[in-house]
């Protein structure tokens, strides 16, 4: 009799577990997203009007934390200075998955003409600068806040736990800070207690509204900051032979970098971009200065190839300086690692995103892009996938629409519900996996 009762109890338990694991219908998700869309739009516009630079997202973090608490989530603030982590525990035990959004704005003077355009300012490198959400992070925050509300409303149907990561300083470590937002949040336990099995994130970019695109393996480039310091000998501009002309050396350095990239890297194997973007030297038209400072960015998709190019550049720049009688110091600092989408998760995700966006609107094999994202650091700890949402204005050719970081960048608010829906379905379907 005891065996029979035990067997019956086990059968009931398994049946209950199976019931809990049933998929939430996409129609249920659609209806919930539409109900909260006015809120999501209002959050986006409020956040757009009140942008904050990296590690200064105090108001933004407060808006996020208050919302998550109102939903009944466990909330931790100050994770990575201004980061916020919310934990939603479903009614039944199960897996753990994470969703991430970035919160920081840029030192950009907005020129979108929107009625809710930013007029905010902030402190950057010792100066007061205009600040704007010129990369779409306001959209990302609003989407993930909306997803948290939808998922909290489905708590009784969820088996497992969802971790919401709202990250500061995605645009890189601010001057004087050793680490950016993702690395610091990880260091301070954003992916611990509970530890997710996987993490997913998104970004709005130029593209046909309603489309989703990404790729397995290397998707977004590793980004390094390059600094070059040249030392020569000051002299009169009329007597260049009496000194060491660092301006001429700087010109040769730029040419050397461009030649190294074009002539020593096979472009058919991995994209590589090495750009010198600033050259600073001198104070007067007829004085050859004694020093020059150059800076730039290196974007790569292969660690071994990147290391080899850095070594060649260091050696070549040193030789150029030596030929003129100058000296050179060369340094490289990583801003973001390679966004490497887990192969298995990438394949699993394609039908989930199609469920959200519709047939023909998902491309899981898009070419890699040389822009960077520090979501990559989360992927170094747990498997993850990062994908893009097309968000060009209606009627505008995506190839001609203003890019991210432009003063005119204005992502299409019509993609807000899709972003909420991709977040929600990604989390639900991951937790529903057998």
Image (tube, rainbow, N blue to C red):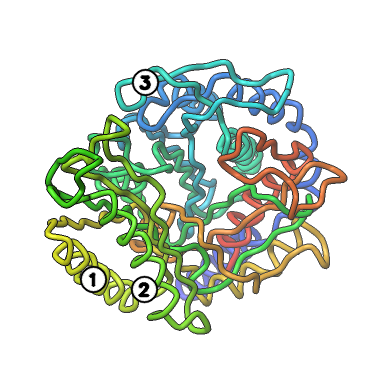
| Alpha carbon separation for disc pair 2 and 3 | 37 Å
Give the image location of residue 406, x and y in percent. Answer: 60, 39
- Counting residues from the N terminus, which is met first, the one under dot 2 or under dot 3? 3
Q: Nearer the viewer, mark 2 or mark 3?
A: 2
- Counting residues from the N terminus, which is met first, the one under dot 1 or under dot 3? 3
Please name the residue that numbered disc 1 is placed on.
Answer: 316
Quarter-of-image position of residue 174: top left
Give the image location of residue 167, x and y in percent. Answer: 42, 40
Residue at 21% in and 56% down: 331
Please name the residue that numbered disc 2 is placed on.
Answer: 260
Residue at 54% in and 19% down: 50
Please tell me whether mark 3 sits on a helix, a strand or a loop.
strand
Residues at badges 1 and 2 in contact (C-beta under 8 Å)?
yes
Q: Is residue 87 left or right of residue 260?
A: right
Q: Nearer the viewer, residue 327 or 333?
A: 327
Q: Is residue 192 above or below residue 350?
A: above
Q: Is residue 319 left or right of residue 130?
A: left
Q: Is residue 68 above or below residue 203?
A: above
Quarter-of-image position of residue 357: bottom right
Residue at 42% in and 28% down: 53
- Counting residues from the N terminus, which is met first, the one under dot 1 or under dot 2? 2
Residue at 52% in and 29% down: 108
Quarter-of-image position of residue 79: top left
Please tell me whether mark 1 sits on a helix, a strand or a loop.
helix
Q: Residues within 10 Å of mark 2 (few under 14, many from 20)?
A: some
Q: Is residue 156 left or right of residue 290?
A: right
Please name the residue that numbered disc 3 is placed on.
Answer: 123
Give the image location of residue 341, x and y in percent. Answer: 50, 68
Q: Nearer the viewer, residue 153 or 397?
A: 397
| Alpha carbon separation for disc pair 1 and 2 | 9 Å
């Amino acid at each position: 009799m005891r065996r029979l009762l035990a067997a019956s109890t086990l059968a009931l338990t398994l049946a209950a577990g199976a019931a809990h694991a049933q998929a939430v219908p996409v129609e249920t998700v659609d209806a919930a997203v539409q109900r909260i869309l006015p809120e999501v739009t209002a959050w986006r516009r409020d956040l757009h009007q009140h942008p904050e630079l990296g590690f200064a997202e105090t108001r933004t973090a407060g808006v996020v934390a208050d919302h998550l608490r109102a939903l009944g989530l466990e909330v931790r603030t100050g994770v990575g200075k201004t980061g916020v982590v919310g934990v939603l525990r479903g009614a039944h035990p199960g897996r753990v998955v994470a969703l991430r959004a970035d919160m920081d704005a840029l030192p950009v003077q907005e020129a979108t003409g929107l009625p809710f355009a930013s007029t905010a300012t902030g402190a950057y490198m010792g100066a007061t600068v205009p600040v704007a959400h010129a990369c779409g992070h306001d959209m990302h925050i609003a989407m993930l806040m909306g997803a948290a509300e939808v998922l909290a409303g489905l708590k009784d149907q969820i088996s497992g736990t969802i971790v919401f990561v709202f990250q500061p300083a995605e645009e890189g470590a601010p001057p004087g800070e050793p680490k950016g937002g993702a690395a610091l949040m990880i260091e301070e336990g954003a992916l611990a207690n509970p530890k997710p099995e996987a993490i997913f994130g998104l970004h709005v970019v130029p593209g046909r509204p309603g489309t989703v695109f990404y790729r397995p393996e290397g998707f977004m480039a590793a980004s390094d900051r390059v600094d070059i310091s040249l030392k020569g000998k000051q002299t009169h501009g009329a007597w260049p032979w009496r000194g060491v002309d660092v301006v001429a050396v700087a010109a040769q350095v730029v040419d050397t970098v461009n030649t190294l990239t074009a002539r020593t890297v096979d472009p058919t194997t991995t994209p590589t971009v090495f750009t010198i973007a600033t050259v600073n030297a001198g104070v007067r038209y007829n004085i050859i200065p004694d020093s020059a400072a150059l800076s730039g960015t290196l974007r790569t998709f292969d660690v071994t190839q990147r290391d080899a190019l850095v070594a060649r550049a260091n050696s070549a720049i040193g030789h150029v300086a030596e030929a003129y009688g100058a000296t050179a110091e060369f340094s490289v600092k990583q801003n973001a690692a390679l966004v490497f989408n887990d192969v298995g998760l990438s394949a699993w995700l394609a039908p989930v995103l199609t469920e959200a966006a519709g047939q023909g609107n998902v491309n899981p094999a898009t070419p890699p892009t040389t822009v960077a994202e520090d979501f990559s650091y989360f992927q170094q700890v747990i498997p993850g996938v990062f994908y893009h949402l097309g968000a060009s204005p209606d009627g505008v050719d995506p190839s001609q629409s203003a890019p991210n970081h432009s003063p005119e960048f204005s992502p299409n608010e019509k993609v807000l519900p899709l972003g909420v829906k991709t977040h929600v379905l990604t989390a639900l379907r991951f937790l529903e996996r057998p």
